[in-house]
Amino acid sequence: MTGMRTNEGTSATTVESPNPATESVTAVPTATKCRGLRGATTVVANTAEDILEATDELMHVLIHLNDLDPDEVASMFFTTTPDLTAIFPALAARSAGWTGVPLICSHEMNVPGSLQKAVRVLIHVNTTKASNEMRHVYLKGARQLRPEWAYSDEQIAEILADASAHTVARG
């Protein structure tokens, strides 16, 4: 079995005939599923600049690591801890050109002792990828929430440099 991409952008799996004497090949569509993609980061202060900068970094890393296309994203759900009120984090996605994707913001529950100054996102992606192929991203102070999905500042710098190089190369 080998995968192929059709002109319509749908995925299919090529299945070779069980009889080698026949040369027919059948393309069987691979199921597209809606997968959840998670990310989180923290900000230094409750300012519009800090919230947008941190959210923009988080979004760029998620987009690059998962090769996200706005046409394949069903929606994005952003949350902030109750101490972040200066601006909606979804504006960072809008500013990055994600104007056709439904976005919404809300506050997390105010649980005593929980992480503060955090921005979280849940992206609903229509994809043929398996759930273990999705690259969740936890940055800065949010690394403590999901250490297995955490990226260091050095890793983020490399990812963003690579993303920038790909953007320049595409023109």
Image (cartoon, rainbow, N blue to C red):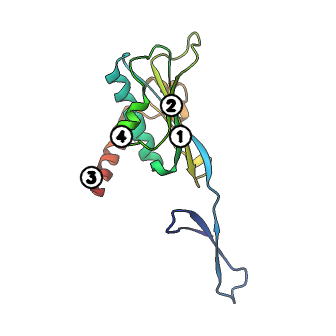
Numbered disc in front, either 3 or 2: 2
Nearest the eye: 87 or 141? 87
Which residue is the extreme one toward the top? 112
* Residue 81, position as x, y percentages in the image: 50, 18
Identify the residue under disc 1: 75
- Which of the two discs, 1 and 2, labels the residue nearer the N terminus? 1
Q: Callout 3 environment at 10 Å: few (<14), some (14 to 19), or many (20+)?
A: few
Q: Callout 2 environment at 10 Å: few (<14), some (14 to 19), or many (20+)?
A: some
The dot on residue 96 is: 4
Identify the residue under disc 3: 168
- Which of the two discs, 3 and 2, labels the residue nearer the N terminus? 2
**Residue 75 visible at all:** yes
**Residue 68 visible at all:** no
Q: Tell me which amino acid carries mark 2.
A: Ile
Q: Kindly check if marks 1 and 2 are in contact, taking CB atoms under 8 A apart as contact.
A: yes
SS state under label 2: strand
Q: Callout 1 environment at 10 Å: few (<14), some (14 to 19), or many (20+)?
A: some
Which residue is the extreme one toward the right? 18
Residue at (60%, 66%) from the top-left corner?
12
- Which of the two discs, 4 and 2, labels the residue nearer the N terminus? 4
The dot on residue 104 is: 2
Q: Kindly check if marks 4 and 2 are in contact, taking CB atoms under 8 A apart as contact.
A: no
